[in-house]
Image (spheres, grey):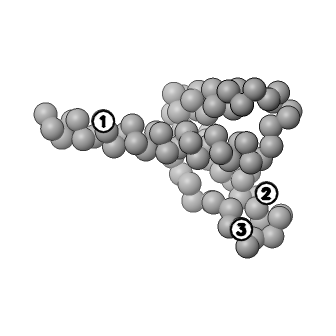
């Protein structure tokens, strides 16, 4: 999972929007399970798809990416312990 394009608070609004869309585009390279976890987080907001904000999407992305990184680290740690 890539997280190369995190919007900086000092960026212009146009750059922030472009960065968020870049982050969304990164999800196309995710595994099916990670992508489904992202969708579940977005559905879990209780908002309709057209009511989601870019902030909602960015929050769900960050939570999903962090969970995936931790899961992979735990898996690697278990493999190393065997």
Using residue 82 as the reference point, say whether residue 13 is left or right of it: right
User: Can residue 25 be seen in the rendering of this structure?
Assistant: no
Label pair 2/1, CB-CB below 8 angstroms: no
Q: Secondary structure at mark 3?
A: loop
The percent position of residue 74, horizontal first and vertical second, equals 31, 39
**Marks 1/3: CA distance?**
34 Å
Using residue 44 as the reference point, say whether residue 65 is left or right of it: left
Using residue 55 as the reference point, say whether residue 80 is left or right of it: left
Residue placed at 56% from the left, 42% from the top? 63
The percent position of residue 53, horizontal first and vertical second, equals 80, 43
- In primary-sequence order, the first of circles 1 and 3 is 3
The percent position of residue 16, horizontal first and vertical second, equals 76, 61
**Marks 2/1: CA distance?**
34 Å
Q: Name the outermost residue toward the front.
A: 46
Residue placed at 68% from the left, 27% from the top? 44
Using residue 45 as the reference point, say whether residue 1 is left or right of it: left
| Residue 40, placed above or below residue 68 | above
**Marks 2/3: CA distance?**
12 Å
Q: Quadrant of residue 59?
A: top right
Q: Quadrant of residue 14?
A: bottom right
The residue at which mark 1 appears reads as 75
Residue placed at 73% from the left, 73% from the top? 10
Q: Secondary structure at mark 2?
A: helix
The residue at which mark 2 appears reads as 17
- In primary-sequence order, the first of circles 2 and 1 is 2
Label pair 2/3, CB-CB below 8 angstroms: no
């Amino acid at each position: 999972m890539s997280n190369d394009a995190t919007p900086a608070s000092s960026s212009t609004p146009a750059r922030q929007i472009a960065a968020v869309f870049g982050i969304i585009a990164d999800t196309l390279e995710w595994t099916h399970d990670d992508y489904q976890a992202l969708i579940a987080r977005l559905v879990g907001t209780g908002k309709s798809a057209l009511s989601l904000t870019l902030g909602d999407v960015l929050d769900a992305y960050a939570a999903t990416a962090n969970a995936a990184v931790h899961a992979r680290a735990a898996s690697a740690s278990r493999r190393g312990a065997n």
